Amino acid sequence: MKNEINSISTEIGNLGICLSGGGALGFAHIGVLQSLEDNGIFPQRIVGSSMGAIVGTLYAAGYTPANMLQLIKDDKLYRISKLMTFRAGFLKSGLANHSMLRGLIKELIPHNCFEQLQLKLHICVANLNNAKWEIVETGNELDKWVAASATIPGLFETMMIGDVFYVDGGLLNNMPAQGINEFCHTIIGVDVLPHIVPAELNKPIDTLAFAVRAMQHQNSKAGRNLCQFIIEPKAIIDFNEFSFDAYQAIYQQGYDATNKFLAENPRMLELKK
């Protein structure tokens, strides 16, 4: 594990992609990956927080964007109730635990091991013991680390691994490009929580949502600065982090945003395989 990376790239030519957290808005990542593939661009190394870690893990395991869409349609990936197991007495730790998500990862990736993935994967988690973000990239407990990265504080049970409490990586680093910077000559960043100016904030819940987004935008800046390209799907304008039923429209936003970005940044096509 590490939380500061400053060394020079040791794998020149390696193309990386950084996938932000964002709940249901993270379905845009699937559309981004599809557009990149349609244009001959295939990242070899992935880092992600929260939903970015979930999508990134499946992609690293060899699931194509089309496979992921089918998983959603099969009711395995999109309903938040399917990824949670609700429990009584939730105020003690969280509203739900991660047994469904962990079971899904082990079902789809039976070896449950970082080293056996088809692509190099790095997952960002937030360590509550030392109040720092960490990057995890080795071991045979993939399901635990994916679940830890997606543990929204207060909503899910805190993940305890060893004697350390872990929660959502996006809490401290929602764009963890630092995790792959030493390995990659180019990093494509995908931020599904770009900063937008609120039109109005009449409800306390809306104020809370924008406050959290502002915090995540601030903790994303260092990672964003390490990306040579930043794609920002704008699904956040029409949907929110819990719009799981809108997966198809959010996917399309990611696909269209990437096609538009490629047209406006033709230099990116030099990354073709």
Image (cartoon, rainbow, N blue to C red):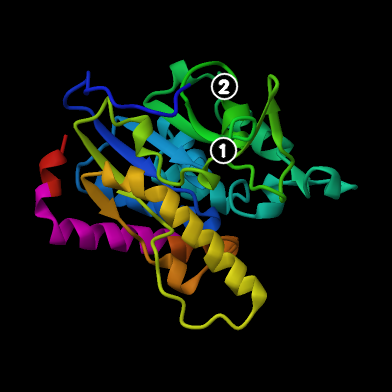
Q: Looking at the image, is mark 1 or mark 2 earlier in the sequence?
A: 2
Q: Is residue 258 shown in magenta?
A: yes
What kind of residue is marked 1?
Ser
Is any part of residue 191 visible from this angle?
Answer: yes
Spatial CA span between label 1 and label 2: 16 Å
Quarter of image, res 185: top left
Q: Is residue 53 shown in magenta?
A: no
Q: Which of the pair 36/133 is nearer the observer?
A: 133
Identity of the residue drawn at 35% across and 38% down? 177
Q: Which of the pair 47/215 is nearer the observer?
A: 215
- Residue 93 at x, y = what percent? 80, 42
For disc 2, the neighbor class at 10 Å (few under 14, some 14 to 19, many from 20) is many
Quarter of image, res 121: top left
The residue tagged with tag 2: helix, strand or loop?
loop
Q: Which of the pair 193/257 is nearer the observer?
A: 193
The residue tagged with tag 1: helix, strand or loop?
helix
> Over which residues does the magenta segment extend?
251-267
For disc 1, the neighbor class at 10 Å (few under 14, some 14 to 19, many from 20) is many
Q: Would you name the residue on which mark 1 appears? A: 149
Question: Residue extending furthest right?
Answer: 89
Task: Pick the quarter of the image with the C terminus.
Answer: top left
Q: Is residue 71 left or right of residue 96?
A: left
Q: Would you name the residue on which mark 2 appears? A: 112
- Residue 109 at x, y = what percent? 55, 26
What kind of residue is marked 2?
Asn
| Figure check: 90 above or below 234 | above
Q: Which of the pair 182/188 is nearer the observer?
A: 182
- Residue 133 at x, y = what percent? 51, 35
